[in-house]
Image (cartoon, rainbow, N blue to C red):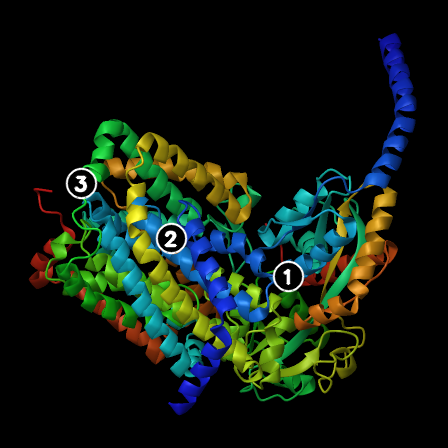
Amino acid sequence: MEELFANLALGFQTAVTLQNLIYCFIGVFVGTLVGVLPGIGPLAAIAMLLPATFNLPPVGALIMLAGIYYGTQYGGSTTAILVNLPGESASVVTCMDGHAMAKNGRAGPALAIAAVGSFFAGTVGTILIALFGPPLAEVALKFGAPEYFSLMTMGLIASAVLASGSMLKAIAMIFLGLIFGIVGTDVNSGMSRFTFGASGLADGLSFVVVAMGLFGFGEILSNLEKGEEASSRDLLNAKLTHLYPTWEDIKLSTGSIIRGTAIGAFFGTLPGAGPTISAFSAYALEKKVAKNPEMFGKGAIQGVAGPESANNAAAQCAFIPTLTLGIPGSGTMALMLGALTIQGIAPGPQVMTQRPELFWGLIASMWIGNAMLVILNLPLVGLWVKLLRVPYRLLFPAILTFMAIGVYSVNNLDLDIYLTVFFGLMGYVFVKLKCEPAPLILAFVLGPLMEENLRRALLISRGDPLVFFNRPISATFLILTILLLVVMILPAVRKKREVAYQEPPSA
Amino acid sequence: MTITIKSTLAVAAVTLASALPIAAGAQAASNQTYPTKPVRLVVAFPAGGSTDIIARLVGQRLGERLGQPVVVDNRGGAGGTIGTEIAAKAAPDGHTLTMGTTSTHVIAPAAYAKVNYDPVKDFEPLTLVASTPYLLVLNPGVKANNLKEFIALAKSQPGKLNFASAGTGSTTQLAMEMLKLAAGIDIVHVPYNGNGPAGTAVLGGQVQALFGSMPAVLPHAQAGRLRPIGVGTAKRSPALPNVPTVAESGFPGFEVSLWLGFFAPKGTPKPILARLQKELTDIANNPEMKAAFEKNGASSVTNTPAEMNALMKAELEKYSKVVKAVGIELK
């Protein structure tokens, strides 16, 4: 414990100088501004802003990066809530209830609770890294192919819970997502699948393309159909009752934030799909424990608080494998790793002992970045909400333009823009058919990982399927999956399930 | 008909004759003013990766020396073939360059069924700037302390051990396949999605061995979490002086490394090529740049265009053999 305080003190000593605080502020500010542009998620935003940090001193660069990281992440949640555009897979969950809240005129509370939940989760995450970083990284190493496969299976089954419409449609969406996930080069054989000879598809469909198309484009198309008057009414005429959460909101969210943080901290250390799995699991859990499950999908504040906290805790804990093992858990982390390398820090087991001031300085700057984010964004909530008052004839073309730029900026491929249009049309059809795209997106993200790990596990076990049951962690996940299925199928709970999945006829 | 063709030819000849001096003049003019606009440096891998980092380090210096910014254009995907194709087809005026590597200019052409560029015919090689060695590492739980013991272990239980790679057809796979062929051992290939996950698999003991790129595995080897048993280069690595090379452990001539060099599209005017070669060679030999490379696990290397062409031809032959023997064909 003493050592921890000494370490943290060293970190804050390194990080807290006027100059560094200014770097942090610039990072958070620019990160939020860029992240809030629709279509430009954290990955694209960091890729764009990264070169700006190359010429700063190492600690300054790190603290600015931390600012940019949290800023873009929060900016991503902002677009998810305000205009239904998820910047990365974890924000898909935020879209569901966050945007519903915005439609009910409660964009302010949604944004504020997202900021507060993220700050709490970020603080806990920082303490966890300081306390248990290295041992937690050891746990991540215990995860081999069978464990990942079983975890993904559980996640996929749990995702059925996300649907607020019919179960059959949710399952259909999951299968569609799995199919889209297959596109690209097969890791095992190196063969291309469903690329139709287009080299731009060799690495598969990009998440940004699918999410922007299904959510953003689809939403805009279906709004256009209603005409400006009718479609603007949703957001404009809804009374902006409160800009900030009410006491009731806070009471409802406190438990969600704590539960979300715990889930995020648990899954976050696993390289791969940490934040996504956490956000979806947190949502599923909130829906299960909530007293008002019928509100989920229609603007339940717990549906924002839980997943947002989980997402941020996971994003924070994703630094654990990145820093201690040098294993980036996501594309964004890979970029951060690259930035560290440019600063002459080779992340890995030795960074803590060789450059303690940098390691602890980074951890301190993470917390400062989180704090700065809340300080900057709570007053800005009002400003973001005003964005909704921009008439659709101006807002829609702007969103489409930024979306096209954002999609293009990920891989610099024009094919991606055409594909976004394709998924946009598909999204429109889904709106018409009342099919929810969220399960599709989750299956799209998890499916390829699941397949890869299934085949890898069987390759290592030389084809013996018992490998999934012989290993305790893997077996635990599979047992949980079976329990989940039983709960869904058992007639005794069917009634409850109907409340959880079926919209009441009046809606 | 014949008349028309003849007259067309005549016109063409006249045009050509009159155009030639103009072209030569334009070349001289462009030579004086090159570069007239920012230079695009195509990097066929995503931002933040090791190729990108080296490209940015060198690109920034090159920009300072040319008096025009060098803009890195990341065109990742399909094993680096997308970006490299873009560079091959760019206007050969010195305003588009690319960072070519063993992956883009040797392995991809050898392993892919179809690549839309020819690594030798479509490019003007400028110079190598850096090279990264490969290091054979084992999970410390494996009962083998050196390459000889590892080979003996593999021979005693054929088809039982596994090795990780950064993907099917990656240098990390081909390096091990080369060793397998040379030593006559049977180890099962388990492909991962990149160097990071492959390293993690060996760290966690899911897979026993990896012929990994130095920057990815060196920190773990130094920390004692991975056991280094062989260096893929001709000479021992200064970072690990006690680890013998694979060549000196009974496989003379064995060499696998990842080189990174600059290329211009074929047809770029000679004076511009000469200017770029000089600047790039100076940059790569700069002590500060050497130190920056070393921090990234690479060492600075320079050579001439003729040496680069010879290197590519030799490597294409070497890797094509392995690709054929193992039966890899990427589509």
**Dot 3: few (<14), some (14–19), or many (≥20) neighbours within 10 Å?**
some
Q: Amino acid at mark 2?
A: Gly
Tell which tag, 2 or 3, sits nearer the viewer.
3
**Same chain for marks 1 and 2?**
no
Q: Secondary structure at mark 1?
A: helix
Where in the figure is residue A314, as x and y percent of width and height?
Answer: 36, 67
Mark identifier at residue B53: 1
Vertical relation: B39 (above or below) B262: above
**Same chain for marks 3 and 1?**
no
Gap in angstroms between the C-alphas marked 2 and 3: 23 Å
Residue closer to the observer: B25 or A140: B25
Where in the figure is residue A71, as x and y percent of width and height?
Answer: 41, 58
Gap in angstroms between the C-alphas marked 1 and 2: 27 Å
Gap in angstroms between the C-alphas marked 3 and 1: 50 Å
Vertical relation: A296 (above or below) B8: below
Residue closer to the observer: B31 or A335: B31
Mark identifier at residue A238: 3
Q: Amino acid at mark 3?
A: Ala
Residue at image mark 2: A76
Image point 65% across, 46% down: which residue? B114
In what quadrant of the picture does the N terminus of chain A appear? Answer: bottom left
In what quadrant of the picture does the C terminus of chain A appear? Answer: top left
Mark identifier at residue B312: none
Looking at the image, can residue A333 be seen?
A: no
**Dot 1: few (<14), some (14–19), or many (≥20) neighbours within 10 Å?**
many
Residue closer to the observer: A31 or A377: A377
Vertical relation: B91 (above or below) A244: above
Where in the figure is residue A313, as x and y percent of width and height?
Answer: 34, 68
**Dot 2: few (<14), some (14–19), or many (≥20) neighbours within 10 Å?**
many
